[in-house]
Amino acid sequence: MQIDILTLFPEMFSGVLGHSMLQKAVEKSAVTYNVVNFRKYADNKHSQVDDYPYGGGAGMVLMPQPIFAAVADLKEKAACKKPRVILLCPQGTRYDQKKAEELAKEEHLIFICGHYEGYDERIRKHIVTDEISIGDYVLTGGELAAMVVVDSVVRLLPEVLGNAESHIKDSFSTGLLEHPHYTRPADFHGMKVPDVLLSGNHKLIEEWRNKEALRRTLERRPDLLEKIELTPQQKKWLQE
Ligand code: ADE
């Protein structure tokens, strides 16, 4: 996968993309990152990228020219001519695991991160394929949001996640939150691991995990239960 990130603050990405799984993904040739300061595409004397809004009002608006030029250049250089062009903004569609899974199937993603009051509407209308918000709060810019999306997409790439089962069972992939996990010791200062997990009975362990995932989801995120089709067994557990 090719990931291009258009930003005025490329340094913000070096820590995140250069560590842990996101860095390993590069070593495994699963992904190539290209972080670009789009100011270099501005065709005016002072490399200006924002301007006052027509009609007046507070704040500056990101100009179309540098973004149009940057995206055209990235498209031309790429092998895949149909990238998803993602604008990070609070007005976008709320991001979730389903969207991460959808984006993980693409060959080429271009992220546009802005730091201004707004984007010229022509960027949205003619360049962008997806507008994404990572939650109902306002960040100072799209960079942190882009990092969230990149992280959640890259970890899903088949070459990256060694244990394929572990993301099939991820919270949200199943529609439920994950069950609790325990590791050694079995007794930590009197705080004990549930007996069933030490029993060696895989069928009972699986059942306990499924039940706990359901219980946790009911307690913390009952809204998620409305989005999935419960099995007869799960319905029974809910009535217990
Ligand atoms: N830019 C500013 N706030 C944002 C948000 N909540 N999600 C995505 N991009 C943003």
Image (cartoon, rainbow, N blue to C red):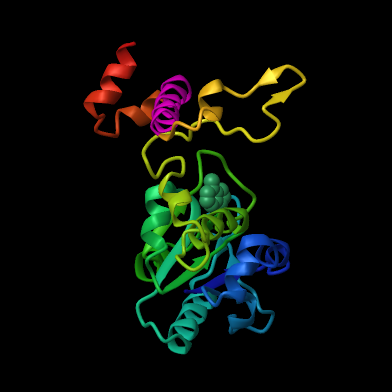
Q: Which residues are magenta?
A: 203-221
Q: Main secondary structure of the magenta part?
A: helix
Q: What is the x, y in percent for residue 136?
A: 50, 38
Residue lying at 38% horizontally and 82% vertically, measured from the top left: 80
Q: How many numbered discs?
A: 0
Quadrant of the rendered structure where residue 86 is? Answer: bottom left
**Does residue 57 show up?**
no
- Between 54 and 233, the residue placed more toward the observer is 233
Q: Hey, which residue is sitting farthest front in the picture?
A: 200
Residue 106 in the image: state x and y as whole percent: 38, 69
- Most extreme residue toward the top is 240
Q: Residue furthest right?
A: 189
Residue at 69 percent across and 19 percent down: it is 191
174 relative to 152, above or below: above
Determine the residue positioned at 46% across, 64% down.
157
> Residue 206 magenta-drawn?
yes
| Residue 21 vertical position relative to residue 97 in the rendered view, above or below | below
For residue 168, side relative to residue 24 (left or right)? left
Q: Nearer the viewer, residue 63 or 99?
A: 99
Task: Locate residue 47, reporting x and y percent.
Answer: 66, 79
Residue 216 visible in the shown view: yes
**Residue 213, image quadrant:** top left
Quadrant assignment for the C terminus:
top left
Q: Nearer the viewer, residue 56 or 180?
A: 180
The image quadrant of residue 137 is top right
In the rendered structure, the answer to whether residue 27 lies left or right of residue 63 reads: right
**Residue name at image x 53 percent, y 69 percent:** 63
> In the image, residue 103 lies at what x, y percent?
40, 62
Is residue 58 positioned above or below 76 on the image?
above
Does residue 228 lie above or below 188 as drawn?
below
- Pick whichever, 60 or 212, lies toward us: 212
